[in-house]
Image (cartoon, helix red, strand yellow):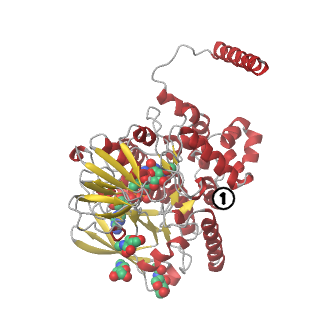
Amino acid sequence: MRGKRIAVIGAGVSGLGAIKSCLEEGLEPTCFEGSSDIGGLWRYEEKTDSGRPSIYKSVICNTSKEMTAYSDFPFPDHYPNYVHNSRILEYLRMYTKHFNLMKYIQFLSKIRGVRKRPDFSSTGQWDVVVEAEGKQKSYVFDGIMVCTGFYADPFLPLHNFPGIKKFKGQYMHSWEYKIPEKFQGKRIIVISIGNSAADLAIELSHVATQVFLSTRRGTWIWCWVWDNGMPVDTVLLTRFNSVLNKLYPTFLINRWAENKLNAQFNHDIYGLQPQHRFLSYQNTLSDDLPNHIISGRVLIKPNVREFTETSAIFEDGTEEDVDVVVFATGYNFSFPFLENNSTVLDSQLSMFKYVFPPQLEKPTLAFIGILQPAGAIIPISELQSRWAVRVFKGLNKLPSVSDMVADITKKRKKIEKDFLNSPRTSRKVQYIDYMDELASEIGVKPSLFSLFLWDPKLAMEVFFGPCTPYQYRLQGPGKWDGAQRAILTQKEQIIKPLRTRILSCGQPVPCLFRSVCAALLLLILTLVILRG
Ligand SMILES: Cc1cc2nc3c(=O)[nH]c(=O)nc-3n(C[C@H](O)[C@H](O)[C@H](O)COP(=O)(O)OP(=O)(O)OC[C@H]3O[C@@H](n4cnc5c(N)ncnc54)[C@H](O)[C@@H]3O)c2cc1C
Ligand SMILES: *[C@@H]1O[C@H](CO)[C@@H](O)[C@H](O)[C@H]1NC(C)=O
Ligand SMILES: *[C@@H]1O[C@H](CO)[C@@H](O)[C@H](O)[C@H]1NC(C)=O
Ligand SMILES: *[C@@H]1O[C@H](CO)[C@@H](O)[C@H](O)[C@H]1NC(C)=O
Ligand SMILES: *[C@@H]1O[C@H](CO)[C@@H](O)[C@H](O)[C@H]1NC(C)=O
């Protein structure tokens, strides 16, 4: 029997995982990629290309490698924990080669239209119009996986900035920014305080005369390098913490986090303290921002009220001369090739588990990677694909339309309650909970109880250790023999690239002995001081 033919749109990290998932289930994928190569956002190009995602040259992946990998393809040992974009691309090339995905991809092929066929209600088939070499061709597919990302359409809110049109300097979106050289000696304002804004302000401050970072709401700043110098996601994203999160009241977690972040530097004094609590909004990851503020290279300012020909006037009445304005104000996203594209856009927040539009007669359209996880996207979009192909094949059934809509409404209410309302947070998911939800559908959620029985050591690591993607390859469909080893060695993998100078105090006993002595000494001293 011929496998179902699936069109995968886009060959970024989500598209590559989608092709691989199709192959795993014996479907026949054809991937259409508008540009000339794989990688999507992670393929750095010197020039921007409208409709394509774009990154600046120095981008480093902000999720650590053990947490970011595809579930059956760990990063090479020697890669650092936080990987430069060129190495992510290198990794994607290795993945593509290893699973032999290249032959399923058609480059320079842009999807122009995706429409239901007249007999859709019985076949679930789609007419797909592809433009290649200036010609349009039409194909029929049994299923569609939309993997087009959402960082290609820069959002420039000029209407919020009176006077920007008469401003004589240069203004641009962060999407256009590539390298710092041509900003030598300029006075620059970066608008907004997301991850990109903080990164750009820091990078530009090394060449600019002065950089201002303008923020309306402020933010909580947290860091890559967490307790004991471990990557923050490997420390916080554990199953154990996920259980604690459910047991502790939100205000306690907020207080714990805010105290911890304020102990690094006082957010109030640094002008960053937001109105919102830690858990209710996307926070900014930046280890370098505080030391750029304290050295005056970056000055925090409030919102800009208006621009004049040569300067910016802020809401507190202060005015600064500036040459360049960089808007790091995020992105719009859309699916221009879909019929009813505007409805799909509006109802984007109403996909069943962010993947399936609930109203279709047949579940043959899946959106992959269109969400904002508080962690790495690869493991999530991979699970979405693994689930979607099972639905395409009929191995998994979706609930009735009304049940799906009820589930969507329930989730949306929870998000509205937990997060500040903003387009960004509406796609935000609880990382482990969401992955487990998808994994349960597929039948690959690690069963802790039976793990404890047959491999307690592994079970401990699964529960207390970082929730790495390998956990979803331990059992069930798509089981990978290397998963157990990958989990048991993940701590070594984190430490290995750091140990480039191995200290001789390697024997644990004398070290332990010394620290016990030190602790005793400290205790005695404290007692003496308290008494005296
Ligand atoms: C500056 C920046 C830093 C980021 N850092 C991280 C990070 O550290 N960790 C993380 O997990 N995430 C990060 N992200 C999020 C990022 O979006 C994801 O990591 C990831 O790139 C999403 O991959 P994707 O495959 O879904 O989409 P993309 O990488 O955007 O790929 C989409 C592909 O689809 C193609 N395409 C689009 N439309 C069509 C069409 N009509 N026809 C044919 N092809 C089409 C495009 O050419 C592109 O190749 C970052 C985002 C930005 C902007
Ligand atoms: C982008 O978003 C803004 C505001 O959210 C909206 O006004 C504008 O129409 C959007 N543009 C497109 C092309 O969707
Ligand atoms: C997408 O929507 C716009 C506006 O509603 C429409 O002009 C365009 O034809 C649509 N695209 C497709 C492929 O249907
Ligand atoms: C587009 O809208 C029509 C009319 O509402 C609907 O019948 C059809 O299913 C929609 N198509 C998609 C792909 O959502
Ligand atoms: C990493 O950076 C991207 C782009 O700025 C952002 O969307 C994402 O939330 C960041 N990830 C984390 C874990 O903060």
Is residue 163 shown left or right of residue 358? Answer: left
Is residue 308 shown left or right of residue 226? Answer: left
Please name the residue shown 36% across and 67% down the image: 157
Which of the pair 113/159 is nearer the observer? 159
Is residue 325 shown left or right of residue 438? Answer: left
Please name the residue shown 44% across and 68% down the image: 5
| Residue reaching furthest to the right | 531
445 w.r.t. 482: above or below: below
Residue type pointed to by label 1: Ser
Position of the C terminus, as image quadrant, is top right
- Position of residue 8 measured from the top left corner of the image (x, y, whole percent): 41, 64
Please name the residue shown 62% across and 57% down the image: 439
286 w.r.t. 394: above or below: above
Quadrant in the picture for residue 256? top right
- Position of residue 12 measured from the top left corner of the image (x, y, whole percent): 39, 56
- Position of residue 494 measured from the top left corner of the image (x, y, whole percent): 53, 34
Is residue 426 shown left or right of residue 61? Answer: right
Res. 437 visible in picture: yes
- Residue named by callout 1: 440
Quadrant in the picture for residue 298? top left
Which of the pair 246/51 is nearer the observer? 246
- Position of residue 282 measured from the top left corner of the image (x, y, whole percent): 52, 56
Which of the pair 117/263 is nearer the observer? 263
Mark 1: few, some, or many residues within 10 Å (few <14, many ≥20)? some
